[in-house]
Image: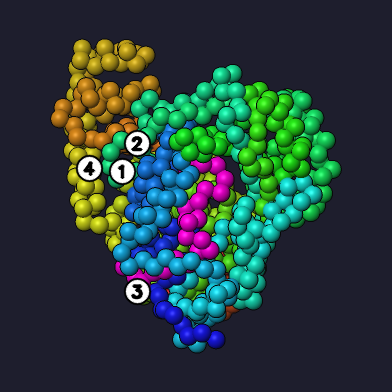
Amino acid sequence: MSAIQNSFDVVVIGGGHAGIEAAHAAWKIGVKTAMITMELDAIGRMSCNPAVGGVSKGQIVRDIDALGGLMGLLTDKAGIQFRMLNLSKGPAVWGPRAQCDLKAYSRVARETLENCKGLHLIQGELAAFDRMPNGKMELTLLSGKRFETKTLVITSGTFLASKMFTGLETSIGGRVGEPSADALSKSILSNGLRLRRLKTGTPSRLDPSTINFNILQEQPGDENPWPMSDRSAGPIDNGNCCWITRTNIKTHDILRSGFKDSPMFSGRIKGKGPRYCPSIEDKINRFGDKDGHQLFLEPETKDVERVYLNGFSSSLPAEIQLDALHTIQGLEKVRVMQIGYAVEYDSIDATQLYPTFECKTIPGLYFAGQVCGTSGYEEAAGQGMIAGINAALKTQNAEPFMLGRSESYIGVMADDLSHFLLDEPYRMFTSRAEYRLFLRSDNADSRLKDRARKIGMIDDAQYAAWETRKAEMARVQKYLAETPVTAAEINPFLEAAGQAPTRESIRLNTVLRRPGIDPEAFFQKFVPNSKLIRRDMWNLFAEEAYAGFFARQAKEIEHEKKMDRIKLAPDTDFSQISALSIESRERLAEARPLTVGSASRIPGIRPSDIMVLTHWVENH
């Protein structure tokens, strides 16, 4: 057996979106960090669609950015089209989204990590990990190399014991041309953790020279695009277009003819796929009455070397997929450069983790990303951020870092994953967040920047810039609340916005509470010498527009925060709290919550038992 090559504070396994954020966060906090990944050239590789963000997902990216993470910056550097989704609705559910050059994203991600002085990037595959008597983890790679670490973050994506399926063909791997991490899956099981099988899929990649774009509906980027990160320097690239087409009855008939050879319908794939991102054959099977399904043609690179067919994920036989594609408008003569396929893989039951993403039974072991049963780059990156932060803080004997449900979509996700047993991949939606009016993409910095500063994720220059912005928002907010405007001054603006004129003077802040107001035009016209950036204008607008709703939810949020401030020790012996019901004692012992608030969200826990638990903590 070879000698231990090096010792680290934090080791991150995997170089995907979760791994990138975890390694960067641990390094940023200042501990000795390494990333071990199968292929360094695959760091930040986009396995599925070449895009970042969207409704709720874009909010996660903005939250990562406010916490000092990388995804927003990488997206702005690699982006080729930027759009704000859901603009017809209120800003609480707007979702920034960017189409990316996937080659550029991977390149920029690796370069960024390589520029993190002291962050070790190691090519290799983890075969086994074992907890040593001194509390550290011993890591053994397939090559035989051995390392030692105080904490371990596993972000293995879809590679644990993974298989790929296209029709009757099956191969081993978690992505085309890349192997499966079978040994690591066995090591996780040998450490007493529960795994389950899940499924994901990806559509065909198309040759753009064989697509008739002239008859397709164009989908350009926004005229005035929003960057993902306010830390981005220089303009963003918004020059590329996407296109829209649809399936039809003939397409569906051809797809149905392949159902008998479908690995999903035949039972060869045991894992469940994402409910809200189904394969095209699943759509046809579940929604047979529909005569068509919308598809989006998305360029994978700025030069449009390949086209990703969003909405046509499939694991049907290759010839069935190709015949079906040829029935779609604009794709009659298309050539497929990579056929669609499904991936089945092991994932961990995330109820075995705390909301910090640390394993409840193995201190110092963390999981993040699709291995936790989620789908999506953004969800993975958010988990990686929290796992990396907490792994680093643990080595410093510092308090864990947790986000509440009223603080961030990442907090909602962490809470959901650690409390609810899921049988399908978890995807973030705005509807999962009770306090989504507070969790907007425009106010991520206001919610999270100060907390990030306290743990070392925000440097002096970044925080000074934020303090300047914060002071300007406070100044403008005060000015709006104190400054009256006459009817003669405001009525032309109101009438242009389609609003009824006023007969008397009103304060400026009340104007923002009216529907149909353009905040950017408002601030430019009525706030002299304003230095607000665009995002902060919308933040102040939303604060006024939603003021009534905020007041109603404030007490509820404060109660939740109060419950989350009541800490429970990880080794609390709930069986000794005799006033608890037997059922609640058993559920609490299994879940091992870290706060009374967390305990209150465990399915089956009675409100009366939460009162008992609160009283018990106050007296011990």
The amino acid sitting under disc 2 is Ile
Camera sees residue 419: no
Label 2 environment density (alpha carbons within 10 Å; few <14, some 14–19, many ≥20): some
Q: Quadrant of the N terminus?
A: bottom right
Q: Is residue 569 left or right of residue 259?
A: left
Helix, strand or loop at mark 1: loop
What residue range appears in magenta? Answer: 29-53
Callout 4, which amino acid?
Arg
Q: Separation of disc 4 and disc 1 at Cα?
A: 15 Å
Check contact, mark 2 vs mark 3: CB within 8 A. Answer: no
Q: Residue at x 18, y 32 (%)?
A: 530
Residue at the spot of label 3: 396
Q: Distance between the residues labelled 2 and 4?
A: 21 Å
Secondary structure state at the residue bearing disc 4 = helix
Q: Which amino acid does the dot numbered 1 rest on?
A: Ser
Q: Which of 392 and 301 is in front in this view?
A: 301
Magenta-colored stretch includes residue 61: no
Q: Distance between the residues labelled 2 and 3?
A: 38 Å
Which dot marks residue 232?
1
Q: Residues within 10 Å of mark 3 (few under 14, many from 20)?
A: few
Mark toward the viewer: 4 or 1: 1
Q: Three-letter amino acid code at disc 3?
A: Gln
> Whole-Å distance between the Cαs marked 3 and 1?
31 Å
Q: What's the mark number on residue 469? A: 4
Q: Give the residue pinned by disc 2.
A: 236
Q: Is residue 95 above or below residue 403?
A: above
The mark nearer the N terminus, 4 or 1, is 1
